Image (cartoon, rainbow, N blue to C red):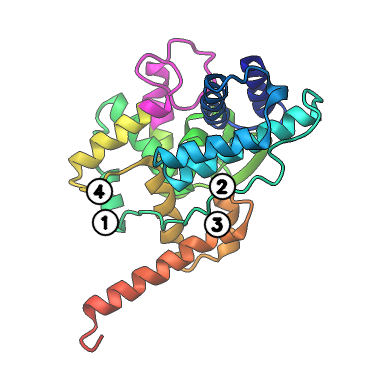
Amino acid sequence: MEGHIEEFAEYLTEIRGSSENTAASYKRDLYSFTRFLEENGIHNIKDVNRTNIMAYIYELEREDKAPATISRNAASIRSYFIYLARKRIIDDNPAEGLETPKVEKRMPAILSLSDVERLLEQPDITDVKGIRDKAMLEVLYATGMRVTELISLEISDINMEMEYLSCKNGEKTRIIPLGSKALEALDEYLRKARMSMLRDEGEKTLFVNCFGHPMTRQGFWKIIKVYAKKAGIKEDITPHMLRHSFAVHLIENGADLQAVQEMMGHSDISTTQMYARLNKNRLKDVYSKTHPRA
């Protein structure tokens, strides 16, 4: 059964254009599901029925897994069996119409403008590492990109003259403008830091680590944690918080939802509307705390 999972993962990245992280998440869920099946005497994917799938879902609930985790596992299983049916590896799809627990959408955590400014001031721009870190943080906050999109940027994706970058996510590409601060930090990085960090002058990736290799998610995660601590930010900061902060700060300053949707790369405007609701909640909170007759 594991061979089919590997083929499915290849299909996700090569045909569907899913990211490596998405494919890895599906694989983890499906390998866990496969272990459950084998522990219950099922070793052929053709023998799986709806009862087996529901038994696995109930097992996750019994283990007190979060609704979001159960929902994600169910989505992985559902997509997997659709793939198997289309490839005619199975005759009937036992996961068709599989219901999953509803996941309550949590409002994302964001940083205040002052927190963001303190964070962006932390890199020491007298050395190449600090110059690179400054550029990465400025670009992330200026564009609202996902971390995977940021570390996947190539030199050719940056247009300094026209002041924008091309952000690729699978087969989709969106154009995002760059502000003056991000452009300034990028220019510094390209002129003073990147070449001295490279080991291979043919490297196309924009942001590299101290060994000249492409920056990793884990590497950037550590970077932002260090600077958050230096900035005195008490929240458990994540790179995604800068993405959320980018959206809310734009809306606070009058940006329309459709423009924010395009820059964020949301396929559905309802996802972007979450930030508008969060902005309204913040305004109410400020009002209730500061108005003398609130």
Between discs 2 and 3, the one toward the N terminus: 2
Residue at which label 4 appears: 235
Nearest the eye: 215 or 41: 41
Q: Which amino acid does label 1 sit on?
A: Ser
Between discs 2 and 4, the one toward the N terminus: 2
Binning the other alpha carbons within 10 Å of mark 2 as few (below 14), some (14 to 19) or many (20 upward) gives some
Q: Which mark is residue 271?
A: 3
Residue shown at 37%/27% (left/top)? 218
Between discs 1 and 4, the one toward the N terminus: 1
- Residue 205 is covered by the magenta coloring: yes
Q: Alpha carbon of mark 1 to alpha carbon of mark 2: how far? A: 24 Å
Residue 16's spot in the image, x, y percent? Answer: 70, 32
Q: In this view, does 292 lie above or below 17?
A: below
Q: Which amino acid does label 4 sit on?
A: Glu
Binning the other alpha carbons within 10 Å of mark 1 as few (below 14), some (14 to 19) or many (20 upward) gives few
Q: Give the range drawn in magenta.
A: 189-218
Q: What residue type is labelled 2?
A: Ile
Q: What residue type is labelled 3?
A: Thr
Whether the residues at callouts 1 and 2 have beta carbons within 8 Å, the answer is: no
Residue at which label 1 appears: 114
Q: Considering the numbered disc 1 on the image, is that residue within a helix, a strand or a loop?
A: helix
Residue at which label 2 appears: 176
Is 206 left, or right, of 85 in this rendering?
left
Q: Considering the numbered disc 3 on the image, is that residue within a helix, a strand or a loop?
A: helix
Nearest the eye: 274 or 145: 274
Q: Is residue 118 visible?
A: yes
Pick the quarter of the image with the N terminus: top right
Q: Considering the numbered disc 2 on the image, is that residue within a helix, a strand or a loop?
A: strand
Residue 280's spot in the image, x, y percent? Answer: 41, 71
Q: Can residue 122 be seen in this view?
A: no
Q: Nearer the viewer, mark 1 or mark 4?
A: 4
